[in-house]
Amino acid sequence: MVLLPDKKLTDRTFDQLLEEVAEASQQFHHSVTLDFTEIGFVDPYGMIGLILLLRFLKMSSGASPKIILPQGDVRSYLGRAAFLQEAARFADFLPPLDQVWLRNMKLLEGSTPSLLEVSLLRDSCAIPGVLNHVENALRDQLAYKKANALDICIMLSEISHNVFDHNEAGTICYVAMQTYTDRQENKFLCVSVGDNGVGIPDTLRTNTRYAHLENDSDAIRESLKKHVSRLDEHTRGNGLYHLLELVWKHAGRMCIRSYAGGVYVRADRKEERIYRSALLPGTQFGVSFPS
Amino acid sequence: MNIIEYSLGHYGSHLWGRTIGETVRENIEAELSALDPGVILAIDLHDVEVMDFSFASEVVGKILSRRPVEYSDRYVILQGVSVYVKENLDAALQNLELAVLVIRNEDWEVIGKIGGVDIETLQELFEANSATSREMAARLDISITAVNNRLRKLADLGLIRKTRAGSSGGRYRYHWLV
């Protein structure tokens, strides 16, 4: 049984959960039961990270992990955000969820309607539709100015297209977006993209110029610089650099986890740190902005 | 001056991703190849509301970086660029160390990697309409060597061109023009 190390599952706490699951499952070789009864808050990064983790656990151990869900508002929110529906493909809920309730979740309105519920993208053709939804949600529901809404769309476009540009066919990608209000009544927007691909470090190391970057975190940090790409083309290698510039422009923060590495950047406090993550295949981006 | 327009809006108002960009670029390059020497291709962005950096790099970046080698006697400018698109295009071109002339009504500007002296040289040439190196040196009050360095740089960026304008004393005279 793995208890949540923190009542919040976000870009700041997901890696703690990852470490505990890695240890309990003996590096994902055995299935586990995750006790989420005490969970109080899950952001898009936490939802997508968890889905990728559940998927990997099921594939590695051959058995579906089990999740003891919270009751009340948090469970309803996870249903409205389409997290439960997607997680149900890889995990068993305890007690089992009513399928009718699960199917009808999307129709219910709650105190936190989902801006972009957890969405599965199987190829790049699906991206424009998601971006259109995101732009409309930001402008219509949150009264974002067009330029700011399009900046968010550009970020999502760069990250999502990278998944399919740098991975083989069959790689999947999840996207989700939500807005929150913290205890100090500050509103912020969270966007997350996660995939089960090759990962930034190994992708970058296919270019001999970066083969020396043994540490995954160093490789991720390198990928955020200008002209850094697995391809030696003059017009490549600036996508993530531009992404970082947009994060700074909007005083946001960004977390990138890929395989065993992670980079966390916070523009409002000019904070940057790299960290080591438990090895989970794929890449996750989490970007948050004051809304 | 012969200008052919090519509308990017045909591909949509929201231009996302390098894959789509590759198709668009190939179409534009086919158009460029078919142009007569000296013709200017004006890529029209009137109906474009947004393009991501990958699309901008793939289309505008690659075309501009290939132009000096593959289409050296054809020129590319942009027109109808919104303030928002200009901001992101500028960022993309700055990082690629490229620049392009942007026309809006009767006015012009250059976006991308270009310094103060380059703008100054361009402005003088624009006012002169066309000029020899010697004339430009006099206008800018700098040496012939210095002005030729500036003009060559602007020519490599595809912002100006050199045309033969007769001969004098057995030597060809060249005029520079925007």
Image: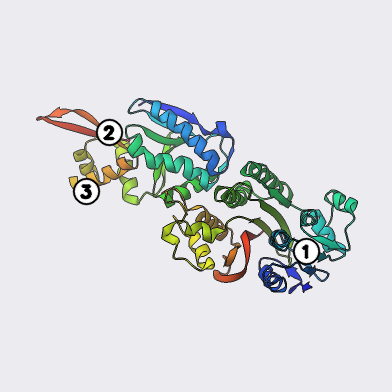
Vertical position of residue B97 compared to residue B71: above or below: below
Q: Nearer the viewer, mark 3 or mark 2?
A: 3
Q: Quadrant of residue B171?
A: top left
Marks 2/1 same chain: no
Check disc 2: other Cα within 10 Å, few if <14, some if 14-19, many if 20+.
many
Does residue A257 appear to the left or right of B98 in the view shown? right
Label 3 or label 2, whichever comes before in sequence order:
2
Q: In which quarter of the image is residue B50?
A: top right
Say which amino acid is labelled 3.
Ala
Task: Name the subunit of mark 3.
Answer: B
User: Which residue is under mark 3?
Assistant: B146
Q: Please tell me whether mark 3 sits on a helix, a strand or a loop.
A: helix
Circles 2, 1 touching at the beta carbon (< 8 Å): no
The residue located at (22%, 44%) in the rendering is: B148
Say which amino acid is labelled 1.
Pro
Does residue A110 appear to the left or right of A146 in the view shown? right
User: Which of the numbered marks, if any, corresponds to residue A65?
Assistant: 1
Q: In which quarter of the image is residue A15?
A: bottom right
Task: Name the subunit of mark 2.
Answer: B
User: Which of the numbered marks, if any, corresponds to residue B130?
Assistant: 2
Does residue B160 appear to the left or right of A130 in the view shown? left
Check disc 3: other Cα within 10 Å, few if <14, some if 14-19, many if 20+.
few
